[in-house]
Image: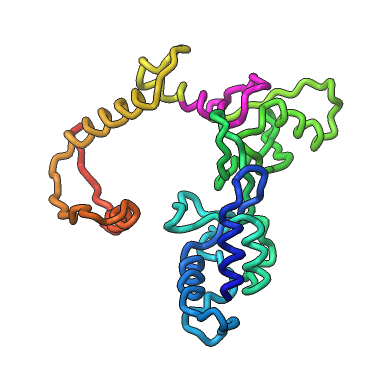
Amino acid sequence: MLRQKEKIDEFLKLPVEGRAWYVIDFQWWNKWCTYIESVTNEESLDLASDDYPGEIDNTALLSDDGKLKPNLLREQDITLIPEEAWNTFVQYYGCVHTDTSVFRRTSIQTPTGRYVVEIYPPCFTFRDVDTEKEYFEGTYSEAQTIGELKAIVKKNLKLDNSTNVHLFVGDPLEELSEDDATIGEASLERQKREIAVIANQFSGYAQHDSHELLVFLLDGLHEDLNRVKDKPYIEFKDAGNRPDEVCFSSFMKFPTVKFQLNC
Protein backbone atom coordinates (compact mmCIF):
# COMPACT_ATOMS: atom_id res chain seq x y z
CA MET A 1 0.00 0.00 0.00
CA LEU A 2 2.88 2.33 0.72
CA ARG A 3 4.20 1.66 -2.77
CA GLN A 4 0.80 2.51 -4.25
CA LYS A 5 0.72 5.84 -2.42
CA GLU A 6 4.27 6.65 -3.53
CA LYS A 7 3.38 5.94 -7.16
CA ILE A 8 0.31 8.19 -7.05
CA ASP A 9 2.26 10.97 -5.32
CA GLU A 10 4.90 10.83 -8.06
CA PHE A 11 2.28 10.92 -10.81
CA LEU A 12 0.62 13.98 -9.27
CA LYS A 13 3.91 15.87 -9.60
CA LEU A 14 4.01 15.37 -13.38
CA PRO A 15 3.81 18.55 -15.50
CA VAL A 16 0.50 19.54 -17.08
CA GLU A 17 2.02 20.06 -20.53
CA GLY A 18 1.56 17.35 -23.14
CA ARG A 19 -0.34 14.99 -20.89
CA ALA A 20 -3.87 13.59 -20.67
CA TRP A 21 -5.76 14.19 -17.44
CA TYR A 22 -8.86 12.57 -16.00
CA VAL A 23 -11.78 14.02 -14.08
CA ILE A 24 -12.51 12.03 -10.93
CA ASP A 25 -15.25 12.38 -8.31
CA PHE A 26 -13.88 14.34 -5.36
CA GLN A 27 -15.76 12.14 -2.87
CA TRP A 28 -14.08 9.02 -4.26
CA TRP A 29 -10.71 10.79 -4.15
CA ASN A 30 -11.24 11.81 -0.51
CA LYS A 31 -12.27 8.27 0.40
CA TRP A 32 -9.13 6.88 -1.23
CA CYS A 33 -6.94 9.40 0.65
CA THR A 34 -8.56 8.37 3.94
CA TYR A 35 -8.18 4.69 3.12
CA ILE A 36 -4.54 4.90 2.06
CA GLU A 37 -3.65 6.76 5.28
CA SER A 38 -5.47 4.24 7.47
CA VAL A 39 -3.62 1.11 6.35
CA THR A 40 -0.20 0.13 7.63
CA ASN A 41 2.85 -0.22 5.44
CA GLU A 42 2.61 -4.01 5.45
CA GLU A 43 -1.07 -4.33 4.67
CA SER A 44 -2.39 -5.23 1.24
CA LEU A 45 -5.79 -4.13 -0.07
CA ASP A 46 -8.37 -4.59 2.68
CA LEU A 47 -11.64 -5.05 0.79
CA ALA A 48 -13.59 -5.36 4.03
CA SER A 49 -12.49 -1.99 5.37
CA ASP A 50 -15.19 0.67 5.73
CA ASP A 51 -12.77 3.13 4.18
CA TYR A 52 -12.14 0.99 1.09
CA PRO A 53 -13.08 3.28 -1.84
CA GLY A 54 -14.27 0.55 -4.21
CA GLU A 55 -14.48 1.07 -7.97
CA ILE A 56 -14.00 4.55 -9.38
CA ASP A 57 -17.56 5.83 -9.67
CA ASN A 58 -18.13 9.12 -11.51
CA THR A 59 -21.87 8.57 -11.95
CA ALA A 60 -22.72 11.62 -9.83
CA LEU A 61 -20.73 13.80 -12.25
CA LEU A 62 -22.78 12.86 -15.31
CA SER A 63 -25.99 14.45 -16.57
CA ASP A 64 -28.81 12.50 -18.22
CA ASP A 65 -27.23 12.83 -21.67
CA GLY A 66 -24.06 11.12 -20.46
CA LYS A 67 -21.94 14.27 -20.52
CA LEU A 68 -20.15 15.95 -17.65
CA LYS A 69 -22.49 18.12 -15.55
CA PRO A 70 -21.92 21.87 -15.92
CA ASN A 71 -20.38 24.11 -13.27
CA LEU A 72 -18.51 21.38 -11.38
CA LEU A 73 -15.98 22.90 -8.99
CA ARG A 74 -12.43 21.65 -8.65
CA GLU A 75 -11.47 20.32 -5.22
CA GLN A 76 -15.14 20.37 -4.24
CA ASP A 77 -16.97 18.28 -6.84
CA ILE A 78 -14.06 16.94 -8.86
CA THR A 79 -10.30 16.69 -8.94
CA LEU A 80 -7.94 16.12 -11.86
CA ILE A 81 -5.37 13.35 -12.00
CA PRO A 82 -2.87 12.50 -14.76
CA GLU A 83 -3.52 9.51 -17.00
CA GLU A 84 -0.80 7.50 -15.27
CA ALA A 85 -2.57 7.87 -11.92
CA TRP A 86 -5.94 7.05 -13.49
CA ASN A 87 -4.59 3.82 -15.02
CA THR A 88 -3.10 2.84 -11.65
CA PHE A 89 -6.43 3.39 -9.89
CA VAL A 90 -8.29 1.37 -12.53
CA GLN A 91 -5.75 -1.44 -12.15
CA TYR A 92 -6.15 -1.58 -8.36
CA TYR A 93 -9.83 -0.73 -7.92
CA GLY A 94 -11.58 -0.96 -11.28
CA CYS A 95 -14.06 1.53 -12.75
CA VAL A 96 -17.86 1.52 -12.88
CA HIS A 97 -17.91 2.96 -16.39
CA THR A 98 -16.69 0.99 -19.40
CA ASP A 99 -16.41 4.10 -21.58
CA THR A 100 -14.05 6.42 -19.71
CA SER A 101 -13.37 8.79 -22.63
CA VAL A 102 -16.00 11.18 -21.24
CA PHE A 103 -13.68 11.84 -18.27
CA ARG A 104 -10.50 12.32 -20.33
CA ARG A 105 -9.21 15.85 -20.83
CA THR A 106 -6.16 17.37 -22.51
CA SER A 107 -3.97 20.32 -21.63
CA ILE A 108 -3.82 23.46 -23.77
CA GLN A 109 -1.45 26.41 -23.81
CA THR A 110 -2.95 29.76 -22.85
CA PRO A 111 -1.90 33.04 -24.54
CA THR A 112 0.40 33.68 -21.56
CA GLY A 113 2.24 30.43 -22.26
CA ARG A 114 0.85 28.58 -19.26
CA TYR A 115 -0.61 25.09 -19.70
CA VAL A 116 -4.04 24.36 -18.25
CA VAL A 117 -6.50 21.46 -18.43
CA GLU A 118 -9.76 22.10 -20.27
CA ILE A 119 -12.50 20.67 -18.08
CA TYR A 120 -15.24 21.90 -20.41
CA PRO A 121 -13.88 21.93 -23.97
CA PRO A 122 -16.27 23.58 -26.45
CA CYS A 123 -18.74 21.28 -28.21
CA PHE A 124 -20.21 22.32 -31.58
CA THR A 125 -22.98 20.97 -33.77
CA PHE A 126 -22.45 21.80 -37.43
CA ARG A 127 -25.61 22.37 -39.47
CA ASP A 128 -26.62 24.01 -42.73
CA VAL A 129 -27.66 27.65 -42.26
CA ASP A 130 -30.47 27.46 -44.81
CA THR A 131 -31.93 23.98 -44.27
CA GLU A 132 -31.04 23.51 -40.56
CA LYS A 133 -29.84 20.02 -41.49
CA GLU A 134 -27.39 18.71 -38.90
CA TYR A 135 -24.20 17.21 -40.27
CA PHE A 136 -22.06 16.23 -37.29
CA GLU A 137 -21.15 17.13 -33.72
CA GLY A 138 -17.76 17.27 -32.10
CA THR A 139 -15.79 18.34 -29.05
CA TYR A 140 -12.80 20.55 -29.71
CA SER A 141 -10.31 22.75 -27.89
CA GLU A 142 -10.30 26.48 -27.26
CA ALA A 143 -6.73 26.47 -28.58
CA GLN A 144 -7.85 25.30 -32.04
CA THR A 145 -8.23 27.99 -34.69
CA ILE A 146 -11.23 28.83 -36.83
CA GLY A 147 -9.18 27.74 -39.84
CA GLU A 148 -8.71 24.31 -38.28
CA LEU A 149 -12.47 24.04 -37.71
CA LYS A 150 -13.07 24.81 -41.39
CA ALA A 151 -10.61 22.07 -42.34
CA ILE A 152 -12.52 19.63 -40.11
CA VAL A 153 -15.78 20.57 -41.86
CA LYS A 154 -14.23 19.95 -45.27
CA LYS A 155 -12.93 16.57 -44.15
CA ASN A 156 -16.23 15.43 -42.64
CA LEU A 157 -18.29 16.58 -45.62
CA LYS A 158 -15.68 15.33 -48.11
CA LEU A 159 -15.30 18.77 -49.67
CA ASP A 160 -12.45 19.81 -51.90
CA ASN A 161 -9.75 21.86 -50.16
CA SER A 162 -10.43 24.74 -52.55
CA THR A 163 -14.05 24.98 -51.37
CA ASN A 164 -14.84 28.15 -49.45
CA VAL A 165 -16.39 27.33 -46.07
CA HIS A 166 -18.08 29.97 -43.93
CA LEU A 167 -18.78 29.31 -40.26
CA PHE A 168 -21.48 31.15 -38.33
CA VAL A 169 -22.32 30.96 -34.64
CA GLY A 170 -24.84 32.42 -32.19
CA ASP A 171 -28.28 33.95 -32.41
CA PRO A 172 -28.36 36.17 -34.39
CA LEU A 173 -25.81 34.45 -36.60
CA GLU A 174 -22.34 35.95 -36.64
CA GLU A 175 -19.59 34.82 -39.00
CA LEU A 176 -16.30 33.52 -37.62
CA SER A 177 -14.11 35.08 -40.28
CA GLU A 178 -10.67 35.27 -38.65
CA ASP A 179 -9.04 31.97 -39.59
CA ASP A 180 -6.03 32.57 -37.34
CA ALA A 181 -8.13 33.35 -34.26
CA THR A 182 -8.57 30.55 -31.74
CA ILE A 183 -11.98 29.36 -30.61
CA GLY A 184 -11.29 30.93 -27.21
CA GLU A 185 -10.39 34.29 -28.74
CA ALA A 186 -13.46 34.27 -30.98
CA SER A 187 -15.67 33.50 -27.99
CA LEU A 188 -14.21 36.37 -25.95
CA GLU A 189 -14.68 38.76 -28.87
CA ARG A 190 -18.37 37.80 -29.10
CA GLN A 191 -18.82 38.32 -25.36
CA LYS A 192 -17.19 41.75 -25.64
CA ARG A 193 -19.64 42.79 -28.35
CA GLU A 194 -22.61 41.51 -26.32
CA ILE A 195 -21.47 43.53 -23.30
CA ALA A 196 -21.00 46.59 -25.52
CA VAL A 197 -24.73 46.53 -26.33
CA ILE A 198 -25.50 47.65 -22.76
CA ALA A 199 -22.18 49.34 -21.96
CA ASN A 200 -20.92 51.68 -24.67
CA GLN A 201 -17.50 52.03 -23.06
CA PHE A 202 -16.68 48.49 -24.19
CA SER A 203 -17.53 49.13 -27.83
CA GLY A 204 -14.94 49.66 -30.54
CA TYR A 205 -11.40 48.34 -30.56
CA ALA A 206 -10.00 49.99 -27.44
CA GLN A 207 -8.40 47.61 -24.96
CA HIS A 208 -9.97 47.09 -21.54
CA ASP A 209 -8.53 45.22 -18.61
CA SER A 210 -10.34 42.83 -16.28
CA HIS A 211 -10.53 45.52 -13.57
CA GLU A 212 -12.74 47.72 -15.77
CA LEU A 213 -15.08 44.82 -16.50
CA LEU A 214 -15.26 43.86 -12.82
CA VAL A 215 -16.08 47.45 -11.81
CA PHE A 216 -18.86 47.55 -14.43
CA LEU A 217 -20.36 44.26 -13.21
CA LEU A 218 -20.20 45.26 -9.53
CA ASP A 219 -21.81 48.64 -10.28
CA GLY A 220 -24.65 46.87 -12.07
CA LEU A 221 -25.07 44.43 -9.20
CA HIS A 222 -25.10 47.31 -6.71
CA GLU A 223 -27.83 49.09 -8.68
CA ASP A 224 -29.95 45.94 -8.86
CA LEU A 225 -29.64 45.29 -5.13
CA ASN A 226 -30.68 48.87 -4.37
CA ARG A 227 -33.93 48.19 -6.24
CA VAL A 228 -34.95 45.37 -3.89
CA LYS A 229 -38.11 46.29 -1.97
CA ASP A 230 -37.76 43.97 1.01
CA LYS A 231 -34.22 43.03 1.94
CA PRO A 232 -34.39 39.84 4.05
CA TYR A 233 -31.83 39.52 6.82
CA ILE A 234 -29.64 36.45 6.38
CA GLU A 235 -27.24 35.66 9.19
CA PHE A 236 -23.94 34.27 7.92
CA LYS A 237 -21.06 33.14 10.09
CA ASP A 238 -17.85 35.13 9.76
CA ALA A 239 -15.08 33.43 7.83
CA GLY A 240 -12.67 33.45 10.75
CA ASN A 241 -9.74 31.22 9.94
CA ARG A 242 -11.75 28.80 7.83
CA PRO A 243 -10.44 28.01 4.32
CA ASP A 244 -12.14 29.78 1.41
CA GLU A 245 -13.48 26.47 0.10
CA VAL A 246 -15.25 25.74 3.40
CA CYS A 247 -16.77 29.24 3.58
CA PHE A 248 -17.98 29.00 -0.02
CA SER A 249 -19.53 25.58 0.61
CA SER A 250 -21.35 26.89 3.70
CA PHE A 251 -22.66 29.93 1.83
CA MET A 252 -23.98 27.80 -1.05
CA LYS A 253 -26.13 25.81 1.41
CA PHE A 254 -28.36 28.84 1.99
CA PRO A 255 -31.68 28.65 0.11
CA THR A 256 -32.11 30.86 -2.93
CA VAL A 257 -33.98 34.07 -2.12
CA LYS A 258 -36.14 35.68 -4.79
CA PHE A 259 -36.20 39.47 -4.64
CA GLN A 260 -38.96 41.75 -5.88
CA LEU A 261 -37.52 44.75 -7.66
CA ASN A 262 -38.75 48.34 -7.88
CA CYS A 263 -39.09 48.71 -11.67
Q: Is residue 146 left or right of residue 214?
A: right
**Callout count:** 0
Q: Residue furthest front?
A: 41
Q: Position of residue 151 (x, y in %)?
A: 77, 30
Res 66 seen here: no
**Does residue 241 show up magenta in the picture?**
no
From what the image shows, is residue 108 above or below residue 77?
Answer: above
Q: Position of residue 218 (x, y in %)?
A: 28, 31
Q: Which residues are the magenta region?
A: 171-191
- Quadrant in which residue 17 is drawn: top right
Colouring scheme applied when the structure was drawn? rainbow
Q: Residue at x 67, y 35 (%)?
A: 132
- Quadrant in which residue 42 is drawn: bottom right
Q: Residue furthest bottom?
A: 48
Q: Position of residue 62 (x, y in %)?
A: 55, 59
Quadrant into which the N terminus falls:
bottom right
Q: Is residue 251 left or right of residue 93?
A: left
Q: Residue at x 64, y 19 (%)?
A: 178
Task: In this rendered view, identify the residue nearer to me: 2 or 145.
Answer: 2
